[in-house]
Image (cartoon, helix red, strand yellow):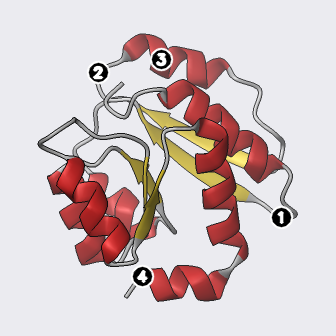
Amino acid sequence: DGVGKLEAIVESIGSALGKRSGASQMVVVCGKNARLRQRLKEVQWPRNVNVVVEGFVTRMSVYMSAADCIVTKAGPGTIAEASICGLPVMLSGHLPGQESGNVKYVLQHGFGAYSRKPRTIARTVNRWLSQPDLLAAMSV
């Protein structure tokens, strides 16, 4: 559960996406957290939200290239890869000290936002997806 509160974040985003018109898809990567993976697979998601739940993956770049945005903790590798892909980043946490500067970097360069609160994360992602011009501006 590398981003912390992942289950609450995913459920909040799924609920927000379910209120949108049209179909949405969300890919959730749980890493080695098999219990969380199983719990998320058992959730009854809104009909218009396709949720793919994965464990540890070796093809994160494929998911990133297909995504409109990513929700993650402020790890430098993920931020660098998202930046290279032009992928807006919703940061949901960071390790004190070593990752704090990464949050500041994303915010100062305008390609993401930060919150630890699942509902705020969901509202932010939903707003981004509702505003294609904003997403495009953040993707440069």
* Separation of marks 3 and 2 at Cα, in angstroms: 9 Å
Residue 100, compared with residue 88, is above or below; it is above
Name the residue nearer the viewer: 76 or 20: 76
Q: Earlier in the sequence, mark 1 or mark 3?
A: 1
Secondary structure of the residue carrying tag 1 is loop
Name the residue nearer the viewer: 118 or 13: 118
| x then y, percent, for residue 28 | 48, 39
Identify the disc placed on residue 32. 2
Identify the residue position indicated by label 3 in the image: 36
Secondary structure of the residue carrying tag 4 is loop
| x then y, percent, for residue 73 | 33, 44
Secondary structure of the residue carrying tag 3 is helix
Name the residue nearer the viewer: 43 or 136: 136
Q: Are marks 3 and 2 in contact (CB under 8 Å)?
A: no
Question: What residue type is disc 2 on?
Answer: Lys
Disc 2 crowd rating (10 Å Cα; few below 14, some 14-19, many 20+) is some
Identify the disc placed on residue 139. 4
Residue 36, compared with residue 90, is above or below; it is above
Identify the residue position indicated by label 1 in the image: 22
Q: Earlier in the sequence, mark 2 or mark 1?
A: 1
Direction from residue 105 to residue 35 in the image, left or right? right
Query: Residue sitting at 57 percent across and 36 percent down?
Result: 9
Camera-nearest label, 4 or 2: 4
Q: Earlier in the sequence, mark 4 or mark 1?
A: 1
Question: What residue type is disc 3 on?
Answer: Leu
| x then y, percent, for residue 132 | 64, 83
Residue 12, compared with residue 110, is above or below; it is above
* Separation of marks 4 and 1 at Cα, in angstroms: 23 Å
